[in-house]
Amino acid sequence: MSVPIGIIGGTALAELAGVVVAKGDQEPCVSTPYGPPSGPLVRRELAGRDVCFLMRHGPGHKLAPHRINYRANIRALADAGCRQVIAIAAVGGITEPMRSGRIVVPHQIIDYSWGREHSFYDDPQDAPLDHIDFTDPYAPTLRNVLLAAAENLGLDPASRAVHGVTQGPRLETAAEIDRMERDGCDIVGMTGMPEAALACEAGMAYACCAVVVNKAAGRSGGTAIHAEIEATLARGMSDMQAILETAVPAL
Ligand code: HPA
């Protein structure tokens, strides 16, 4: 098998449908020095390429964003040989262009999460400390491939967005979203960090492909957030599947 491409599926991609089962397909839940990842790593062939798929919230979507073992997830993908990781996410839209259903490939992050195990540089016995350069948190080559795939599918993706990452699992208050907009955030999600930083520490190219599933708190004009998410999610998942099938062969 060739070097697999890691895919972390979130709320917007609960499973990869219609993929061909490759040899040595499903691995049992592996262990890492940080404990087990969220679920089994599923090796599949997708559009002719090996992929290694991991559900961020675990089977049955049970793990809350602050309970996800991000270190174990990234370490497990690295141990499986992945050098590139595509992270799928469902997000709320803060700024006007981030309308529901829109595909977004963010270029920047602001981290509002707290208390999560966020670094591999934890134990002085481990590898010598490195302060990773995180100026551009997402790999430009991966971003370009995701954007080109979405454009080829006629999806009008947003090619720049600042991704604000909150702690969850509750949604935000309207004032928190106002503050995030003043800070420069365009979209809000709960799982983008420390995942992106850990992938960078692990030396992997990492990019996020997000779908806006609701207007963020205080911007919904009366539509209930959960109803909006439900109405948007199915379409978002099928768009994600199509983007992956188009993007993966180009990597
Ligand atoms: N806020 C935070 N995370 C989210 C949202 C939101 O509005 N929608 C989907 N994930």
Image (cartoon, rainbow, N blue to C red):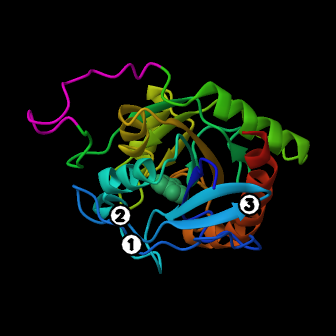
**Which amino acid type is marked by label 2?**
Pro
The residue to which callout 1 is attached is 29
Q: In this view, does 218 lie above or below 62?
A: above
Mark 2 or mark 3, earlier in chain: 2
The residue to which callout 2 is attached is 37
Q: Which of 218 and 96 is in front in this view?
A: 96
Q: Is residue 146 above or below residue 134?
A: below
For image coordinates 38% across by 19% down, the residue present is 133
Segment tinted magenta in the rendering: 121-135
For image coordinates 40% across by 45% down, the residue present is 195
- Mark 1 and mark 2: Cα distance apart in space: 7 Å
**Which amino acid type is marked by label 1?**
Cys
**Which amino acid type is marked by label 3?**
Leu
The residue to which callout 3 is attached is 46
Report if the CB atoms under discs 1 and 2 are less than 8 Å apart.
Answer: yes
Closer to viewer: mark 1 or mark 2: 1
Horizontal and vertical percent for residue 221? Answer: 63, 56
For image coordinates 57% across by 29% down, the residue present is 139
Mark 3 or mark 1, earlier in chain: 1
Report if the CB atoms under discs 3 and 1 are less than 8 Å apart.
Answer: no
For image coordinates 73% across by 48% down, the residue present is 248
Horizontal and vertical percent for residue 93? Answer: 60, 47
What kind of secondary structure does the magenta stretch mostly adopt?
loop
Horizontal and vertical percent for residue 58? Answer: 43, 72
Q: Quadrant of the N terminus?
A: bottom right
Q: Does the magenta stretch include residue 163?
A: no
- Mark 2 and mark 3: Cα distance apart in space: 22 Å
**Label 3: how many residues lie within 10 Å, few (<14), some (14-19) or many (20+)?**
many
Check the image and name the residue furthest to the left.
Answer: 124
Q: Is mark 3 on a helix, strand or loop?
A: strand
Q: Is mark 1 on a helix, strand or loop?
A: loop
Q: Nearer the viewer, residue 32 or 196?
A: 32
